[in-house]
Amino acid sequence: MKKLDEKVFQELYQSYGERRDAIQKRLEDFSQVQPSQYFYELVYCILTPQSSAINAVKAVERLQTRSFYETPFDPAPVLAQKDFYIRFHKTKARLLLQLRERSPEILAALSDSKSTTVLREWLVEHVKGFGYKEASHFLRNIGHHDLAILDRHILKNLKRFGAVRRIPKTLTPKQYLKLEKQFHRFAEAVGIPLDELDLLFWSLETGEILK
């Protein structure tokens, strides 16, 4: 990690000060998510890669309205809606059906008192469509802490603020964990919790503090 110059440091803290209350409120919202909603949070994290978060939220709402969990159906037509199109909707539809089939096992594992990192490893191994990013995203969205969600928005800002020297073209599991450690060191250096920095970086790119 390179040393932050004063101008960049001030820019970071100004942005954080402007958004801190909203960021902390969003993190509090995550901690209040009930187990009855875990399935749809899993669905959301399968849908978001390569698609907008807003479209994923709308698709999840439509699936919930149609009781996808209680009475599974082919979700591909829902994901293909023009108003909230999900890229690779056929592939993701298959992933959602597999998720629903294995949901009792997955939800049972989530109720165990595993550590956050152990739980993430379990999700990566057992939820098709989940890598470290998706598993971290899901766990953050149900109230877990200190996991990096290394999407393109976060990686761009880690490089911008000097936390990493370069962004790898492909992100292997080994590289992911290495970058996560660098993110942790940067968060400690600037005195802002990693979870809050994650949402700050996201909002700097999108203008919104979503999930």
Image: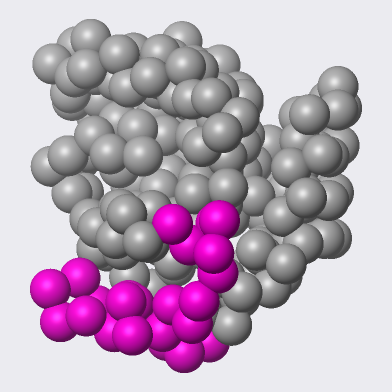
Q: Quadrant of residue 176?
A: bottom right
Residue 113 position, x and y percent, is: 86, 22
Specify the quadrant of the image occupied by residue 108.
top right
State the image coordinates of residue 89 (x, y, percent, origin top left). 41, 84
Residue drawn at x 34%, y 13% is 24
Q: Nearer the viewer, residue 84 or 198?
A: 84
Q: Inspect the magenta stretch and tell me whether residue 55 lies in it.
A: no
Q: Is residue 149 left or right of residue 8?
A: right
Relative to 47, say whether 36 is above or below: above
Q: Is residue 211 left or right of residue 204?
A: right
| Image spot of residue 75 (x, y percent) | 44, 77
Stretch of the chain drawn in magenta: 67-91
Above or below: residue 94 compared with residue 102: below
Estimate the x, y position of residue 93 in percent, counting from the top left: 50, 80
The one of 194 and 136 positioned closer to us in this rendering: 136
Q: Is residue 69 magenta?
A: yes
Task: Please tell me which residue is depicted at 86% across the width and 28% down the height of the picture.
Answer: 112
The residue under the point 51% across, 37% down is 37
Quadrant (top left/top right/bottom left/bottom right) for the C terminus: top left
Q: Looking at the figure, which quarter contains the N terminus?
A: top right
Prevailing secondary structure of the magenta residues: loop
